[in-house]
Amino acid sequence: MKILVTGGAGFIGSTLVDRLLERGDQVSAVDNFSTRRREFLAGALKHSGFRLAEADLLTGEIPAGLMQGCDLVVHLSANADVRFGTERPARDFEQNTTVTFRVLEAMRKNGVKRIAFSSTGSVYGEPSVFPTPEDAPFPVQTSLYGASKVACESLIQAYCEGFGFQGYIFRFVSILGERYTHGHVCDFYKKLRADPSRLRVLGDGRQRKSYLYVQDCVSAMLCALDHALDRVNIFNLGTDEHCEVNDSVRWICERLGARPALEYSGGKRGWVGDSPFIFLDCSKIRAMGWRPTLTIREGIEKTLDYLVKNPFVMERD
Ligand SMILES: NC(=O)c1ccc[n+]([C@@H]2O[C@H](COP(=O)([O-])OP(=O)(O)OC[C@H]3O[C@@H](n4cnc5c(N)ncnc54)[C@H](O)[C@@H]3O)[C@@H](O)[C@H]2O)c1
């Protein structure tokens, strides 16, 4: 297959690119390198089946030739950080919603009709049903990030209806693993490197979260793309477990041999839009034969080991 990956230099994008190349697809990636991690594509760039274009999807055009003849666009480029929405309210709207519209329009103009999209469990806001299934209502959006992703999902669905597209919408829990560049494991490790005697935790540490290992996430996406045939295919992607932030703190400290004094910012939420409990019902993707290979604890430990061996990932922020 000929596949275009937007955000292909990112954490999940570059992992997907490598996996697609491994299985013999022709892969193009477009990225503006705003997260500045060219190293992630070092392996792909040696591959004859890979093409890379540096372009800003908000202001520029997808280079001619990259989209033409594509069987599938996997649209991953975004502002992927849920935390700072209220500080820069335009960013989620522009980088997520506007860019998704521009990608859909480029696809329409080039006759490409199959799109896979990285949404988020944040679209559920603070749900009342746990584990939360794909058909749970999302009455109230609690973050600008989640709101922007709901808008993206709606646009994709409307293009499926209006222009005969086929859409795959993946609502991820937090993803971790090799090439992880943002999120709580990075934050805690950075803080402990700077001062191992204390660790500030956002919220009361009792927030319950779900995490999924990046290779399991990519396997789940590929499984759905191979087996799901509806016009609009929506999947929660996560594990069948959750943990407290305090569990994660304990596992990270044990792995690093650190014994910091813990300081909590307090409250049930770590920041505006933080969900105190995320736990998605993933039985739909499991029914297609997919299973995660790592537990949450194993995923967190693998991520930490990667950061310890690859400090360049944190040094650029
Ligand atoms: N990592 C997670 O825990 C998580 C959870 C839920 C959803 N997601 C979604 O998955 C997708 C990938 O996330 P990630 O963690 O790999 O993030 P990432 O920041 O590592 O990757 C995003 C990539 O998109 C590129 N990009 C951003 N804006 C661009 C633009 N205007 N033009 C071209 N390229 C642009 C960045 O340079 C980066 O390489 C995102 O859509 C994110 O919202 C991620």
Image (cartoon, grey):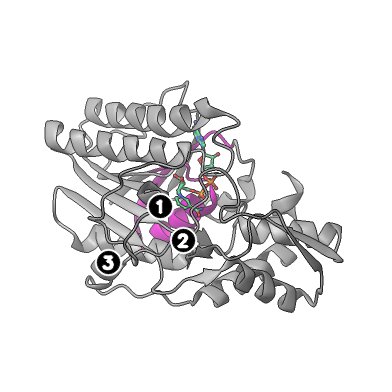
Instruction: Give the quadrant of residue 5.
Output: top left
Q: CA distance from mark 1 to mark 3?
A: 22 Å
Under mark 2, the amino acid is Phe
Q: Is residue 77 visible?
A: no
Q: Is mark 2 within 8 Å of ligand 1?
A: no
Q: CA distance from mark 1 to mark 2?
A: 7 Å
At 53% from the left and 47% from the top, the residue drawn is 10
Under mark 3, the amino acid is Ile
Q: Which x, y percent locates residue 112?
A: 23, 36
Disc on res. 126: 1
Q: CA distance from mark 3 to mark 2?
A: 21 Å
Q: Is residue 105 visible?
A: yes
Under mark 1, the amino acid is Glu
Q: Earlier in the sequence, mark 1 or mark 3?
A: 1
**Left or right: 198 with respect to 63?**
right
* Residue at numbered disc 2: 277
Q: Which x, y percent locates residue 22?
A: 42, 63
Quick one: quadrant of the C terminus? top right
* Residue at numbered disc 3: 285
Q: Are marks 1 and 2 in contact (CB under 8 Å)?
A: yes
Q: Are marks 3 and 2 in contact (CB under 8 Å)?
A: no
312 or 122, nearer to the observer: 122
Q: Does 181 appear in magenta?
A: no
Question: In the image, is residue 304 above or below residue 29?
Answer: below
The residue lying furthest to the top in this view is: 59
